[in-house]
């Protein structure tokens, strides 16, 4: 995993030439993503520049340095990620007459493009974000992998097109303005992140997961064209008779692919089913060498169960070399500036905090690559709230559809005055029913629509009067209805989650926090073939015997105690409810009162302070305050000049 950036002059006769110092500043703003080397390339006519910060994982020699070209230099690439099938692709290309100088998977990209053009993307099995310049045809190609593991951002300013792995690199360009996009902020308050393609910085965009972009400078008016090269649609895999055996083989191959590395690899480890299964297959490939497992605990939290003992016991059972740390509220307050800086744009999941500290510990102990369990719950219906959504759709949504729409709206208003979590969800469901919207938006919601109105400033309320955050997911439902009009509720939920919450929240938090510490994270459950399989199997297989994620649990139970695997999922959280009652709450009050923070431009600060003083009756209310807290810190960082 590395840091990439680039500048393309849109019109060489009217746009300004690329300043090498600007390209350098963009590249070096991401030094944490690549401490092992840096490189820049500027085209002879000065119309295209590429930058790269290197985190050396495969082929540690200077031959793996980037930007990297083909033999004659007409194709140049700056690449972030891993191509797991690069050896097979290399053999195919060599048979077609291509010559390689290195063992790097990066070099495969330039030759693959020479052979297949933009069609190369569909041949890639990996996690990637890249920018490739075709000098012969004056064309830029960018892509983000299918799951969205690697982010790619872009903008257009002063006759130049810019792209990068992080927003901060774009902000290093002197013409890019640091302005909050208020429409994006409105949606962020609901989804905890900004849905692609927008970001919280006005006029800066991100490629959605499984999207590619082409910028053709030979066109009369060069404009970036974005398309999806893959969609999370049901029924894309060839299923075998024995689905359990097929799952076992796919996961085994996925883990094996992700051991591709010339540096130490470990596992983020909770002792739960996903990380345990990951560690089991990893250890089988490691042979006599003990694999490393990493765990972070939060002892003393009143409302959360610390999993450290469970993780420790499972690690001992598996025989791993186990590392663990514990973090507290003091750690949060001491790192809040760094978290705001490295999030790049707010990713308002408090789990960013433990991720930051555990990846830091991994780096300090010499582990550069970590495996994580992200994606297993999304593709195999592992969350308990997924099952609640399915049950509520049958028991509540279908009966409510018989209500006249005016009655639904009145009922929503009445329920909205209640602070009970089940009432706030039902109130929003009734509101959406009255508007003809779908039942499911996301499995992680900060503020529902009516709730947002109570915490927004009067001016922001007026400015956002025509906005509705369901509009962010409406295109997903429209697309699925076009291709699969009879899609089930679970298929709809999965389709939405794999385009919004998974890439922009869960995977983004891993990318930002791990790369802050120069650590790469790989996600075996989001392997290309495994995801296609999970999207194709019957729901009765995913929820066999009424148990969430049962096929994964059954597989893990072949190696460890069944009771440990089939225990109810506890999840992973941070005790922000407790923390907001202490120093964290005092910190938020100070921010709301600080005139320089300009919180009143966006929020009703009196209402937020009231909620802080009297509304911490549930984890959800604390979670909502965290969404605001995280934004204010990020905004403060955004307005800084460096």
Image (cartoon, rainbow, N blue to C red):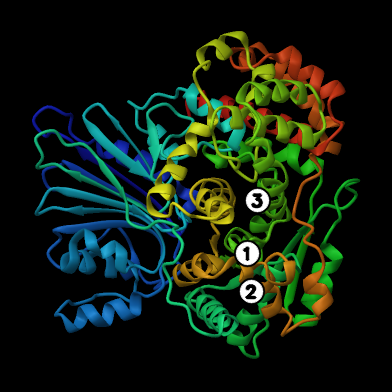
Q: Nearer the viewer, residue 47 or 470?
A: 470
**Quadrant location of residue 289?**
bottom right
Q: Nearer the viewer, mark 1 or mark 3?
A: 1
Q: Earlier in the sequence, mark 1 or mark 3?
A: 3
Image location (x, y in percent) of residue 176: 36, 27
Q: Earlier in the sequence, mark 2 or mark 1?
A: 2
Q: CA distance from mark 2 to mark 3?
A: 21 Å
Above or below: residue 198 compared with residue 66: above
Image location (x, y in percent) of residue 61: 37, 72
Where does label 2 land, which residue?
Answer: 278
Mark yes or no: residue 514 visible: yes
Q: Earlier in the sequence, mark 2 or mark 3?
A: 2
Where does label 1 land, which residue?
Answer: 373
Where does label 3 land, which residue?
Answer: 356
Residue 48, which numbered label? Answer: none
In this image, 452 relative to 80: left or right?
right
In this image, 46 relative to 91: left or right?
left
Q: CA distance from mark 2 to mark 1?
A: 8 Å
In this image, 241 relative to 338: left or right?
left
Find numbered disc 2 in the image and state the secondary structure of the residue it sits on. helix
Mark yes or no: residue 180 visible: no
Which residue sits furthest bottom? 288
In this image, 500 relative to 541: left or right?
left
Above or below: residue 593 compared with residue 340: above
Q: CA distance from mark 1 to mark 3?
A: 16 Å
- Residue at image position (52%, 73%) is 263
- Residue at image position (39%, 36%) is 205
């Amino acid at each position: 995993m590395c840091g990439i950036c680039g500048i393309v002059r849109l019109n060489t006769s009217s746009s300004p030439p690329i300043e090498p110092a600007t390209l350098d500043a963009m590249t070096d703003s991401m030094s944490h993503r690549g401490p092992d080397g840096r490189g820049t390339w500027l085209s002879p006519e000065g119309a295209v520049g590429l930058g790269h910060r290197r985190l050396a994982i495969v082929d540690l020699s200077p031959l793996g340095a980037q930007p990297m070209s083909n033999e004659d230099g007409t194709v140049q690439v700056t690449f972030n990620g891993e191509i797991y099938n690069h050896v097979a692709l290399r053999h195919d290309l060599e048979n077609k007459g291509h010559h390689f100088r290195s063992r790097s998977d990066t070099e495969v990209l330039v030759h693959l493009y020479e052979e297949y053009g933009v069609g190369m993307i569909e041949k890639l099995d990996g996690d990637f974000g890249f920018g490739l310049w075709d000098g012969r045809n004056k064309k830029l190609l960018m892509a983000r992998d299918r799951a969205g593991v690697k982010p790619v951002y872009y903008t257009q300013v002063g006759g130049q097109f810019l792209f990068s792995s992080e927003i901060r690199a774009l902000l290093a360009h002197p013409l890019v303005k640091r302005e909050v996009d208020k429409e994006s902020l409105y949606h962020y308050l609901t989804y905890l992140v900004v849905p692609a393609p927008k970001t919280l910085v006005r006029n800066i965009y991100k490629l959605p997961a499984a999207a590619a972009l082409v910028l053709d400078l030979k066109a009369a008016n060069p404009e970036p064209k974005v398309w999806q090269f893959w969609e999370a649609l049901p029924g894309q895999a060839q299923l075998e008779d024995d689905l359990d055996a097929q799952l076992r083989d796919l996961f085994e191959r996925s883990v094996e692919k992700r051991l591709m590395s010339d540096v130490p690899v470990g596992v983020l480890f909770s002792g739960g089913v996903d990380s345990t299964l990951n560690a089991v297959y990893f250890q089988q490939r490691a042979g006599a060498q003990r694999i490393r497992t990493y765990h972070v605990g939060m002892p003393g939290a009143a409302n959360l169960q610390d999993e450290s003992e469970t993780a420790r016991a499972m690690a001992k059972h598996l025989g791993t070399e186990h590392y663990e740390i514990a973090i507290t509220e003091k750690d949060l307050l001491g790192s809040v500036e760094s978290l705001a800086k490295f999030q790049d744009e707010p990713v308002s999941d408090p789990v960013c905090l433990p991720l930051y500290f555990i990846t830091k510990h991994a780096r300090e102990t010499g582990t550069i690559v970590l495996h994580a369990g992200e994606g297993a719950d999304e593709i195999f219906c592992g969350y308990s709230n997924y099952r609640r959504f399915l049950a509520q759709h049958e028991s509540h949504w279908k009966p409510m559809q018989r209500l006249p729409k005016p009655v639904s709206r009145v009922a929503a208003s009445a329920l909205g005055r209640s602070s009970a979590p089940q009432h706030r969800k039902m109130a929003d469901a009734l509101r959406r029913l009255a508007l003809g919207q779908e039942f499911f938006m996301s499995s992680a919601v900060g503020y529902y629509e009516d709730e947002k109105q109570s915490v927004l400033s009067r001016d922001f309320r007026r400015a956002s009067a025509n906005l509705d955050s369901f509009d962010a997911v409406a295109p997903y439902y429209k697309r699925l209805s076009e291709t699969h009009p009879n899609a089930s509720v679970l298929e709809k939920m999965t389709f939405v989650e794999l385009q919004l919450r998974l890439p922009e929240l869960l995977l983004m938090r891993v990318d930002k926090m791990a790369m802050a510490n120069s650590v790469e994270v790989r996600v075996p459950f989001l392997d290309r073939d495994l995801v296609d399989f999970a999207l194709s199997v019957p729901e009765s297989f995913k929820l066999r015997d009424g148990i969430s994620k049962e096929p994964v649990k059954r597989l893990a139970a072949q190696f460890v105690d069944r009771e440990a695997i089939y225990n109810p999922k506890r999840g992973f959280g941070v005790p922000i409810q407790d923390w907001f009652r202490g120093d964290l709450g005092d910190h938020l009050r100070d921010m709301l009162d600080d005139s320089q923070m300009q919180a009143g431009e966006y929020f009703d600060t009196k209402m937020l302070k009231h909620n802080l003083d009297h509304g911490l009756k549930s984890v959800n209310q604390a979670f909502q305050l965290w969404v605001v807290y995280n934004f204010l810190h990020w905004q403060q960082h955004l307005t800084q000049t460096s």
